[in-house]
Image (tube, rainbow, N blue to C red):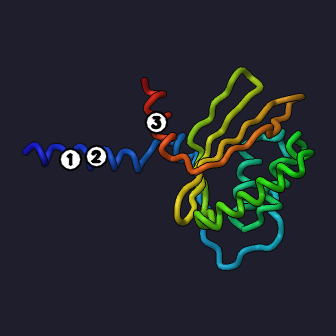
Amino acid sequence: MRFTLILLVVSCSLCLAQQGSDNERAARMFFPPETKESTDSPRQAPGPRRENIPSETIDMFFLGLKAGQVDAAYDGLVKGSVIADRREDVAGLKDRTRHALDNFGPISGYEVLEEKTVGSTLLRRTCISFNSDLPLRWRFYFYKTQGTWKLVDLRVDDGLVELFEESIRSRK
């Protein structure tokens, strides 16, 4: 009886976790499989260009990585930021990203796990990329200046254990 109750609770929890809230589902982005990958650099969807919204910047970044266009993905991500002037640092990021993709597999999509603001001008968006072998954690740091969000830092790692520990700490 006790085992059945535990099994029922676990099953219900898994079902609820899979459904997720509307906000969680909206934060997920999956890329459908395509028969042929474009060799062009990632392009913005047609329509008027709004203020440099971090969501659009991150979407384009992951679309570029999915297409195997690491250089174009980073060039678009750092465009107009102080990071773009640090060419050696950007080249190092590109090389480390290629190495990570070789080790963890190609990216098929990503999900926004957390968005944290400090005041009205600082934003950290934590994402996880869906690589074929192991996911990666990406932390994008933005600063809003003159009405525009600009990337000021980027961290990527395979620190999945830390994600769970941070989640537990934030519930306390």
Quadrant housing the C terminus: top left
Front residue of 160/8: it is 160
Seen from the viewer's position, the closer of residues 42 and 164 is 164
| Lower position in the chain sequence, tag 3 or tag 2 | 2
Q: Say whether marks 1 and 2 touch (CB < 8 Å).
A: yes
Q: Considering only order in the chain, which callout, 1 or 3, is on the residue closer to the N terminus?
A: 1
In the image, taking residue 145 as reference, residue 66 lies left or right, namely: left
Give the number of the disc on residue 8.
1
Q: Which residue is mark 2?
A: 12
Q: Is residue 121 left or right of residue 168?
A: right
**Residue under the point 33% across and 49% down:** 14
Q: Is residue 123 left or right of residue 15?
A: right
Name the kind of residue labelled 2 in the image.
Cys
Label 3 residue SS: helix
Q: Is residue 68 or residue 155 the one in the foreground?
A: 155
Secondary element at tag 1? helix
- Packing grade of label 1 (10 A; few <14, some 14-19, many >=20) is few
